[in-house]
Image (cartoon, coloured by chain):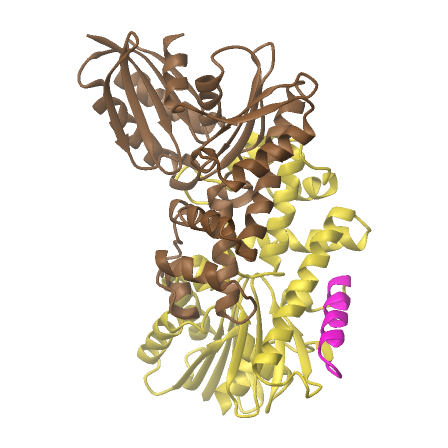
Chain colours: A yellow, B brown
Amino acid sequence: MNVVVGVDAGGSKTLAVAANGGERVGQAERGPANATSLGVESAVGTILEAVSEAARGCQVDAVCVGAAGASRRGVAYPIRQALVKAYPAARVRIVDDAAIALRAAVPDGPGVVVVAGTGSVGYAEDAQGEGHRAGGLGWLIGDEGSGYAIGLAALREAAKTLDGRGQAHALLALVREHVPAKDREELLSSVYARSGAHLETARIAALAEGALRLAGEGDGCANDIVERAALDLSALAVCAARAAGLAQDAPRVVLAGGLLRAETPLVQLVRRHIESDLRGAAAAPLECEPVEGALALARR
Amino acid sequence: MNVVVGVDAGGSKTLAVAANGGERVGQAERGPANATSLGVESAVGTILEAVSEAARGCQVDAVCVGAAGASRRGVAYPIRQALVKAYPAARVRIVDDAAIALRAAVPDGPGVVVVAGTGSVGYAEDAQGEGHRAGGLGWLIGDEGSGYAIGLAALREAAKTLDGRGQAHALLALVREHVPAKDREELLSSVYARSGAHLETARIAALAEGALRLAGEGDGCANDIVERAALDLSALAVCAARAAGLAQDAPRVVLAGGLLRAETPLVQLVRRHIESDLRGAAAAPLECEPVEGALALARR
């Protein structure tokens, strides 16, 4: 049997699906494969494993990987090389995770997507098929509004509360569910390892879900963080749409990534900001899995 | 000859001075020794080297190290153990870098200090000699107003400008003097290494000096960053003073660290905020080197 394989390689998990025609014949899930936080070697290894397990020994005709950070040549190239070597007969396509999310919702033509999972990025394709990106600059200097940004803001407010500069008691309780933080010393040991390593981006991003829940329950500090994130995420979509020349075209804006899946207050705020900034735009959460977009691109 | 050795181990450099009575008889300078960003093993090695070179083979009667992060037992303990092993006959004292800055300016009694170098911390000692700390939570979740925080803010504004979301052209030019950033791809390669490592905290903090200069020249974006830093730094001093019960005592507030040395607009803003929040307080930059405080504590 011959298959095509689509891969969604993100900051919290990696999903590979093998299909024969329209039918899924294999799938595999692995841990995060974010080259920007974990290194490209680690991302390549995770992706290869997931593809191999999903393909289950079938002949692979095509692979499309949507990977966080793959808009960078230095990330896309090693992933491509590893796949070309493992599957010399296959067509190999490496795109950024935003491109597969867009193509999962809008199979063809221009469109806009904002992805907020562990990281964040705005992405739009214009009528000529050219991609335009806003953000996606990684955990240290970008990822505004992402799960990482929300989690880090929660952690910082908790830390300020612990040392007497803040009143974010609910956020401190949330942080304590995730990492030991009895006192300042213990929090610092949880965040900074002796070797100079530090708390992983995925573990910081894991705080976001709880912060969103607290905001929904009316906690003021959590709410401030979520409002900031909504402004940042809508700015990513609006900037990408403008760069692609779609701002006046009442574009469809896809909201994707783990943070924008359900009808949360964050999604409502992001939608409201986008629809107010882009006349006639309609923003809605992605209703299928992003890996469907990777399969669609693999089939092209 | 017998000596006492004082060490100032900070995020940008390490200075050790050996003295015999009141006279300096040796000194050594090394690179950064910040356990929180570089790991405690690296910090210990740097400190040991500096002490050994400064002592020049003399009998060491006492050593006092003021080290960034040494308010953490997990940082202070390994530094202490290494020094006790190397100098079994010496009295060894490990304190936080803020404590030596305070004792360099105020030899005895209660006082307040705010340190802003690569990192930041507020520290006050009450009338009973007990220390009270605000901030100092390291580059990932703390260090508000520090050189690192200013440098990172400059880097983030530059990145936004590069991808079309900002207008911080002067900050982008500044960043380009320090790291290759022709385009988005090159900036990302400068910030994130393939292995998952990232631009060092000291290199990010090195952007602060240029950002302060741009703010002084009237650049709006740089000015916003510096105003934010001034608010954050004064909050550290005020919180530490309150925690030590000194808020009503017209305390003397020492401004220390590489960022608060000269009469810059940042220093003027920090002083104004502190003097407005703490009635009767007088804030002034430290006029000698912090290592003098380490020597004073070593002599005690």
| B158 in magenta | no
Against B174, residue A5 (above or below) is below
Quarter of the image for the N terminus of chain B: give it.
Answer: top left
Given residues A256 and A248, the one toward you in this image is A248
Q: Residue B249, image x and y in percent?
A: 67, 16
Q: Where in the figure is residue A3, as x and y percent of width and height?
A: 47, 86
Magenta residues, start to end: A265-281
**Taking B180 as reference, is A260 left or right?**
right
Residue nearest the observer in this picture, A217 or A296: A217
Does residue B169 appear to the left or right of B11 in the view shown? right
Work out whether residue A105 or residue B127 is closer to the camera in this orientation and state it. B127
Q: Position of residue B153 (x, y in %)?
A: 52, 53
Is the residue A237 above or below the residue B59 in the image? below
The residue depicted at 37 percent of the width and 12 percent of the height is B298
Residue A275 falls within the magenta-colored stretch = yes
State the image coordinates of residue B87 (x, y, percent, origin top left). Answer: 27, 15
Res B141 → quadrant: top right
| Viewer-nearest residue: B66 or B241 | B241
Residue drawn at 44 percent across, 69 percent down: B184
